Amino acid sequence: MNSQQVNESGQPTRFVTTNYPTTVGTPSSSSNTASPFDDNMKEETPLKGDATDGSHIPRYIPSSVVVLFRSTMFITFIVIISIIPIIQLIIGTHYKGQCPINQHIPTYLFVSGICGIILVLCFIMMSLTFLCFSENSTALSIVASCGICFNVLISSLLSTFLFIWFIFGCIWVFGAKKHVQYNDKGSPTYCNVTLYRFSFWLLILSIILVILPCIACCCSPCFVLCRKPKKETNPA
């Protein structure tokens, strides 16, 4: 389409206007066409921590805890650790009444052994409970959740009691260190050598195992800062 206008010099000026077909607000057909494959992916993709992930494990349980308690290595470690409370129970029962300097020492081993065995059984039951979660049985998953809550409660109470009992054991065993003797059974300062030395070194080992992780946690930030490379400053 051609049009003319007159400019300032009086000469006509011709403009050429070309009409192009335009589409306004018309989306392409490809954007409106939904793929059946995309719909299937949306329906079949499970959400994290949802009941459709094949485990029915509650969301409030961290995945690292689930992996730990389901591992064979953890169960093996717990079974090996159970040897210590068994030995405590045997020595505390066998040498009962053979420590006149402080009769609480065999009692300390006896009670620690019983509580330790119960605590180990709680951890083993908790590991087995995590294996009971099933996508095919909602009832079984509910029972497993209740079992975990019960085991956590019992384990927390036992751990708190054992910590307090450990402090009493340190007072009784280390308090008799200066006066204990192993020869004269009729003396009030006598204590069976196996009973006392086992209690003494077991407490020392327990203290070391408690202190080392605390030192590692306190020193790890300093180690990270020392290993961090320094930024190079460019001279002006």
Image: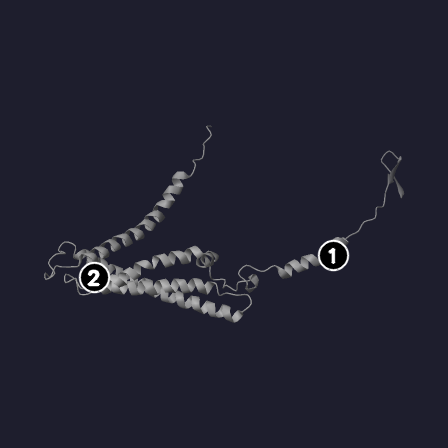
Find residue 233 and report its image quarter: top left
Left or right of 29: which side holds 71?
Answer: left
Q: Nearer the viewer, residue 54 or 219?
A: 54
Residue 105's disc is 2
The image shows residue 235, relative to residue 164, as above or below, that is above
Find residue 228 and report its image quarter: top left
The residue that mark 1 highlights is 32
The image position of residue 193, as x and y in percent, is 18, 56
Spatial separation of the CA atoms under disc 2 and disc 1: 81 Å
Badge 2 amino acid: Ile
Categorize mark 1 by other alpha carbons within 10 Å: few (<14), some (14-19), many (20+). Answer: few
Specify the farthest residue to the bottom.
139
The image position of residue 120, as x and y in percent, is 36, 62
Badge 1 amino acid: Asn
The image position of residue 75, as x and y in percent, is 41, 58
* Labelled pair 2, 1 in contact (Cβ < 8 Å): no
Image point (42%, 55%), residue name: 73
Check disc 2 and report its element: helix, strand or loop. helix
Left or right of 131: which side holds 79?
Answer: left
Image point (67%, 59%), residue name: 39
In this rendering, does residue 25 appear at all? no
